Image (spheres, rainbow, N blue to C red):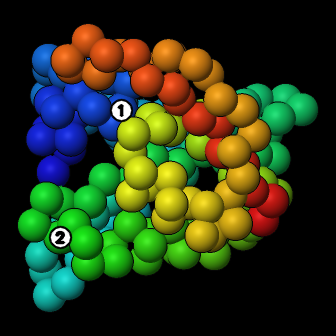
Amino acid sequence: MLEPVFRSGDTYAIDADIPKDAALDYWFGLERTVFVCEDAGVLLGTYYIVRNQKGGGSHVCNCGYVTAEASRGRGVARAMLAHSLEVGPGMGFRAMQYNFVVSTNTRAVETWQRAGFEVAGRLPGAFRMPSGAEVDALVMYRRL
């Protein structure tokens, strides 16, 4: 499920040719709590939640979401987002921040905004698409 998303190179700031072991280490990294969304044993999506910063920023979490290709457009990302907003406070988080949302990922941007996230910052040309085009990356934030 992670491989096609990482290989596409258009939503995550991860090398498109990342080896499988490194991709799994990234997703299941230390201090990350990983959840899956499934239906009758079929994996529909996965997400992680992790402390965004240490020390004074440890009350803010960060999440990453991936939906299986066959499950896109079925509300899986919204369900995983709702779950992360529900479990975040129980894990001690008071806010959620997405550090690097690719502005051309309009489906994600619109989903996060409908859930109350605001664009806290715009990084002009900070993400290079596989085509070489540079597009903006967004910092998105919401209190929990």
Residue drawn at x 31%, y 16% as measured from the top left = 133
Q: Residues within 10 Å of mark 1 (few under 14, many from 20)?
A: some
Mark 1 touches mark 2? (CB < 8 Å): no
The answer to which of 72 and 86 lies nearer the viewer is 72
The answer to which of 94 and 15 lies nearer the viewer is 15
Q: Position of residue 60 (x, y in %)?
A: 76, 46
Q: As displayed, is residue 50 above or below residue 36?
A: above
Residue drawn at x 50%, y 53% as measured from the top left = 109
Residue drawn at x 34%, y 77% as measured from the top left = 75
Residue under circle 2? 71
Residue type at the position of mark 1? Tyr
- Please tell me the numbered disc located at residue 61: none
Q: As displayed, is residue 73 above or below residue 34?
A: below
Q: Position of residue 105 (x, y in %)?
A: 38, 45
Residue drawn at x 68%, y 58% as measured from the top left = 117
Toward the right, the furthest residue is: 56
Marks 1 and 2, how far apart at CA? 19 Å
Kindly tell me whether residue 56 is visible in this rendering. yes
Residue under circle 1? 12
Is 4 placed left or right of 99 in the picture? left
User: Split into 4 quadrants, where in the image is the C terminus?
Assistant: bottom right
Residue type at the position of mark 2? Ser
Is 124 placed left or right of 5 in the picture? right
Q: Position of residue 90 (x, y in %)?
A: 72, 69
Q: Secondary structure at mark 2?
A: helix
Instruction: Indicate the quadrant where residue 35 lies.
Output: bottom left
Kindly tell me whether residue 93 is visible in this rendering. no
Q: Residues within 10 Å of mark 2 (few under 14, many from 20)?
A: some
Is 137 placed left or right of 14 in the picture? right
